[in-house]
Image (tube, helix red, strand yellow):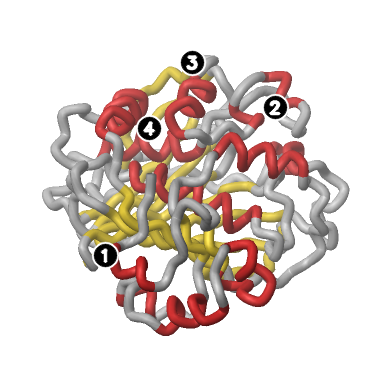
Amino acid sequence: MFEFPQEYQRILPDQSTAASVIDLSDATTKSAANGLTKKQLTLIRSSRLLPEWIMMDPVSPLLFRETPSLPGQYLRALLHRQKPSSQNSLPALAALQSHVMPDVHHVKAYAELCGFNASLSTLPITYPHMLAFPLHMELMLHKRFPLALIGLVHIRNRITQYRGIQPHETLSIYCVLSGQRNTAKGLEFDITSQVCSAGELVWQSVSTNLARLRSSTNSNNSNGKAAEQKRTREPLPPHYALHSQWSLPEDLGRRYAKVSGDSNPIHLWPASAKLLGFKRHIAHGMWSKARLAATLYPQPDSEACTLDVEFKQPVFLPSKVCLFTDPDLSGQFYVADAERLQCYLRGVIQEGSY
């Protein structure tokens, strides 16, 4: 259970009566529901109780007392699938959860499923995404967010780890809608996540999602079918060497959902994926990235590392995929089928933070 830092007690009401989330972006309508007075909200905004790296951001965050429930979030997403999708301007929204401590048993289960060495002394480089993802969901489920969550496509993810994070560290997690771009395929938007330990920024990611808008050229396609459309294939470097081959079992999506909480129906069963336009269920993109990190992360000589991945095509379950890496040690790689005809993702891993 999350508790606000001691300094908040002068400002916040009794926690037994206050809501589990405080919406500072909507003080006029939310103050009564949160059990806060306008004076208390003003004090929170004007105080220096939040970390400095958040105080510089003009966006007032949602403050979470505890980790939001992912199953409940997906239920909310399914019940609100008909949000208008022609909107091309996203609101200024952010979310903050403090005093987050990783569960060592959960970390071990995640590490084993994704192929990390379970005896590592630091968190897997992709694990903080598990902690930030419920806050991502809350931003995209907010009443001011104009896009339906079901149908969004995760197309890129860039992680920068500034140093290894010890499992016993107490963390603050801050997520913000940080950018948007209109493209031929629809609206791209970013969610930037920052993880802080004792005021030090230790980890950051930028997750890019795509919303196919009704006004875009793909308006006549369902989200799932559009994701499966053949795209203009970029040539894959033929000299990249085969690094490893992975067999992805039929139940991988369900196993990863159990660990991560990401129970999007497209990952669970063929029938549930077909309801959303896919011919079969598909692997989680962040499982693929974690598997990559487990394979390639030992390559850098420093805990500081940047791992940038672009998701190109869905990986249907079950399947076999191959990891190819640049023999010139540039850190570049791609994951494809054995014949290199279908590229599922590509990216780069580099020592240090960029």
Mark 1 and mark 2 lie on one chain; the one further toward the N terminus is: 1
Q: Find disc 3 in the rendering and name its residue.
A: 249
Q: Is residue 73 above or below residue 63?
A: above
Depth check, mark 1 against mark 2: the one in front is 1
**Residue name at image x 62 percent, y 55 percent:** 140
Position in image of residue 157 (x %, y %): 45, 52
Tell me the quadrant of the picture where the C terminus can be found: bottom left
**What amino acid type should be assigned to the residue bearing mark 3?**
Pro
Contact between marks 3 and 4 (CB within 8 A): the answer is: no
Q: Find disc 4 in the rendering and name its residue.
A: 323
Tell me the quadrant of the picture where the N terminus can be found: top left
Q: Find disc 1 in the rendering and name its residue.
A: 201
Contact between marks 4 and 2 (CB within 8 A): the answer is: no
Mark 3 and mark 2 lie on one chain; the one further toward the N terminus is: 3
Q: Residues within 10 Å of mark 2 (few under 14, many from 20)?
A: some
**Residue name at image x 14 percent, y 38 percent:** 121
Give me the C-alpha separation between circle 3 and circle 2: 16 Å
Depth check, mark 1 against mark 3: the one in front is 1
Give me the C-alpha separation between circle 4 and circle 1: 31 Å
Q: Find disc 2 in the rendering and name its residue.
A: 273
Q: Residues within 10 Å of mark 4 (few under 14, many from 20)?
A: many
